[in-house]
Image (spheres, grey):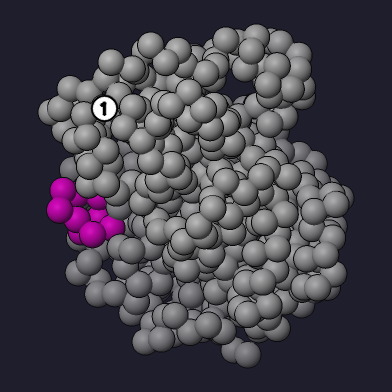
Amino acid sequence: MVHDLEKMQDLAQKVRIHVLDMVNYAQSSHIGASYSIVEILVTLYSNILKINPKDPDNSNRDKFILSKAHASCALYAILAESNFFPLETLKKYYVDGGVLPGHLDKESASGIEHSMGSLGHGLPFGVGLSYANKIDHNPGQIYVLVGDGECNEGSIWESAMFAGHHKLNNLTVIVDYNKIQSFGRVDEVMSLEPFGEKWTSFNWDVHEIDGHDFEQLITVLELKSTKPKVIIAHTIKGKGVSFMENKLEWHYKSPNPEQYDEALKELENKK
Amino acid sequence: MRSAFVNTLKELARKDERIFLVTADMGFSVFESFREEFPDRFLNTGIAEQNTVGIAAGLAMSGKIVYVYSIIPFITMRCFEQIRLDLAYNNANVKLVGVGAGFTYGSMGSSHHAIEDISIMRSIPNMTVFCPGDPFETEELIKRSYELPGPVYIRLGKNGEPVIHKNRNKIEIGKPISITEGNDLILITTSNTLELAKSWVDEWGTEGINVNLVSLPTIKPVDQLEIRKLIDRDIPIITLEEHSIIGGLGSTISEIIAESGKGVKFKRMGINDMFSHYVGGADFQRKKLNILQKPEKSWFLK
């Protein structure tokens, strides 16, 4: 399969500009956490997920769960670009009288599989979907994207143990390992290392890649396994806008007018 | 109540293959027959209630009607946010079945006492709360829970309670049920104190005191008009529950009385705002804490 990397690159930049516009317009948070997952979402929505915006409830569809739901605006942007709802709807993010809330509400728009916002909920839910598909012989694959800080939550490891025990090989977890959590660097707040070994010991297939590299993402996402699969995606918080990259403050801040212009300029130059 | 639950669930599962039973490693000598008959529709998630409830939500979103079983504190409080978000916010078709109402596990200690569950569960939007008081109410309400799409919490006692209902009329969600008629007192109870309430009413009956015993096995929703009819009778009302007096049956009825604008003589009987540090079974706990003791008739007789 030949993948059009240039198109994917182009889509990633569109998503980043949408996110910038949404966060700027709503003056909301979490732009850094949204930017670290853009290539992951673009790869899933343009190459991997068997989904159809015209038939979003098809019972055999693949399902994607954004467990780190604070990165919702990146998901909204890729869903709009994938024709689940009009691009216009992105203007209705987070604001009074809006449509799309800061965290996910499946009633708000098409393509959202689960309402959530508190961390550590998406993986148990995804495990339930995987288990149901196993016993129903449903070919649908389940993908769950979790944050690195989110892996502090005990429920992640309850699910990891269950999925390993039941050999849920229709389940793929992608960890957005951007190394920064709410109030500090992951290695200072609560080190996850040896991270890969943890998952291996829970009987998962473990892959570590550059989470901004489309070819690596496609390769590991397409691999078959007899076990559940975790992709530890090394990413950069705020990726794409140099002054936001690897900065804790962009978990919270929204750009001022000068920062907005500077960010937009940098993103547009990459197109 | 536990046998009534399992038997009714098996009956439903024979008719509807969407029925699915999930347990967080509880159910020894309870679920073996279900597991044998429906091996593909039984899942032991291990002792991990947060994961259990999340998985149940995923199963429900895949078309299953999921019953999750454990001891009350573990299936309501250990995983409360999963209940609030994964079940209630998502309106998932999951029924939480908790065993051990009140001091059912009296000697086990306060970790196993279920005294706040009604209060917290009834405050969650989308959640329906059933508290059957005998095997008949259990059977009926398990059936109602199956018919009702969306999350339901079902509070069970233990096993071997007597059947209190003489006429086995269909139980409707939200409706109070008169067990005995009388004009001296209205005694409203829910869950595992139905047997206790009935014993008091029978004793008073021998003294010529006639009490309207009302079972209210649905705490949420409650048919407000039916409760208003009781208030309008203008005779004393006592609520009886083996649950904190904060947030349970007593609170539910008080709220309706308060908004009715009627002044009616009223008393909440339940567990005061405290943990028990006594060692002993349910009756012993009640005595030591001086709660759920038969009220003096002088309180309600004119």
Closest to the observer: B265 or B117?
B265
Q: Which residue is mark 1?
A: B235
Tell me which segment is drawn in magenta: A92-100
Q: Residue at x 41, y 86 (%)?
A: A55
Left or right: B301 as drawn, with respect to B248: left
Residue B10 against residue B124 in the figure, above or below? below
Q: Is residue A187 visible?
A: no
Q: Residues within 10 Å of mark 1 (few under 14, many from 20)?
A: some
**Residue at far bottom of view:** A1
**Residue occupying the point 70% across, 63% down:** B7
B300 over A243 or under it: above or below? above
Is residue A96 inside the magenta stretch? yes
Quadrant assignment, res B38: bottom right
The picture places residue B214, in percent across and down from the top left corner, at 41, 40
Question: What main secondary structure does the magenta stretch of the protein show?
Answer: loop
Of B191 and A53, nearer the camera is B191
Give amino acid for label 1.
Ile
The residue positioned 60% from the left and 63% from the top of the image is: B66
Residue A172 sits above or below residue A117 on the image: below
Which type of secondary structure does the marked residue at label 1 adopt?
A: loop
